Image (cartoon, helix red, strand yellow):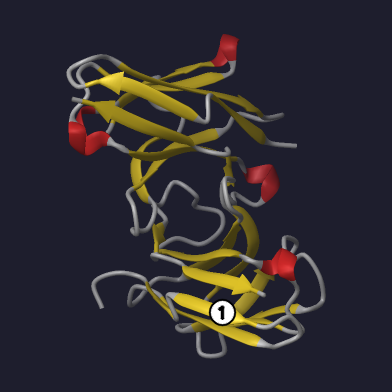
């Protein structure tokens, strides 16, 4: 069965510092992988997705993620954190053998310090 | 509307009451999903519609949960005889693609927060 593990329920970085949010997945078939962001009192918004094309995926707001099959990872990074990046981030996996529905991780709350 | 609209945004129910949560997807979107998000957890799949057909309801936690989308547009999630463990945010999402085309983006509503006392 597909599952997602997000290491660290809370991550705190200084403004301008590197953002690294970790995601490891489990899937018996080649997966599709996603990162969503949820700002306070707003709906989930797609940041980026991996669908078996390029392993390095660029998303909105300067975020990117790299699919590493050998490590079953899909970590999210941003070179320089901005105050507006403070939000909760969810990694999700999907694949045809589960009807292509999304299976989400528990989420990581990103705090950006000034 | 421009996005997925859910109502009510907040609902407080006494244990044993029935509740109905509404989702108005983006116009023309074929697929509609319901997710349940408990406090401190990620969203968990409840059910999926393609147009008016409910193709997957494997995530519904009990027979107290019922969802419908009779005309292939607006959907209602109904919870009968609510219990405290039903307290959660219920998210609705829609997509242009059917279930086989997951690479289409899911657009989420802001959710309906249900509190059962």
**Figure quadrant of the C terminus of chain B:** bottom right
Residue in the image at 40% along x and 27% along y: A53
Question: Which quadrant of the structure image shows residue B29?
Answer: bottom left
**Figure quadrant of the N terminus of chain B:** bottom left
Residue in the image at 82% along x and 76% along y: B63
Reading the image, the residue beneath label 1 is B12
Q: Would residue B97 appear left or right of A113 to someone viewing this image?
A: right
Residue in the image at 64% along x and 66% along y: B87
Q: Nearer the viewer, residue B67 or A108?
A: A108
Question: Which quadrant of the structure image shows residue B83?
Answer: bottom right
Question: Which quadrant of the structure image shows residue A77?
Answer: top left
Query: How many numbered marks appear?
Result: 1
Q: Residues within 10 Å of mark 1 (few under 14, many from 20)?
A: few
> Dot 1 falls on which chain?
B
Q: Would residue A27 appear left or right of A93 to someone viewing this image?
A: right
Residue B25 % position (x, y)? 40, 74
Residue B112 % position (x, y)? 48, 71
Residue in the image at 62% along x and 85% along y: B19
Q: Nearer the viewer, residue B70 or A106?
A: A106
Q: Would residue B1 appear left or right of A30 to someone viewing this image?
A: left
Residue A47 % position (x, y)? 32, 39
Decide: is A89 above or below A82: below
Residue B99 % position (x, y)? 56, 58
Q: Is residue B57 something that shows in the picture?
A: no
Q: Is residue A21 something that shows in the picture?
A: yes
Q: Nearer the viewer, residue A81 or B103?
A: A81
What secondary structure is marked by label 1?
strand
Q: Nearer the viewer, residue B54 or A39?
A: A39
Decide: is A90 above or below B30: above
Residue projecting furthest to the right: B63
């Amino acid at each position: 069965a597909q599952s997602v593990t997000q290491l660290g329920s809370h991550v705190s970085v200084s403004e301008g510092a590197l953002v690294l949010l970790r995601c490891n997945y489990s899937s018996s078939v080649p997966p599709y992988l996603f990162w969503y962001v949820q700002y306070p009192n707003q709906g989930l918004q797609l940041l980026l997705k991996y669908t078996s094309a390029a392993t390095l995926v660029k998303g909105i707001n300067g975020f990117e993620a790299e699919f590493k099959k050998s490590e079953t990872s899909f970590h999210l990074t941003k070179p320089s954190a901005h105050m507006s990046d403070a939000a909760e981030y969810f990694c999700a996996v999907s694949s045809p053998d589960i009807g292509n529905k999304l299976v989400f991780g528990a989420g990581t709350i990103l705090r950006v310090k000034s | 509307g421009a996005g997925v609209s859910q109502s009510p945004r907040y609902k407080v129910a006494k244990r044993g009451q029935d509740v109905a949560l509404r989702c108005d997807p983006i116009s023309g979107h074929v697929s509609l999903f319901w997710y349940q998000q408990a406090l401190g957890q990620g969203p968990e799949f409840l059910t999926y519609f393609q147009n008016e057909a409910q193709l997957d309801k494997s995530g519904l936690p009990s027979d107290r949960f019922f969802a419908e989308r009779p005309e292939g547009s607006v959907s209602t999630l109904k919870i009968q005889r609510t219990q405290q463990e039903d307290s959660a945010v219920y998210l609705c999402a829609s997509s242009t693609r059917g279930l086989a085309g997951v690479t289409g983006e899911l657009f989420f509503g802001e959710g309906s927060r249900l509190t059962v006392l």
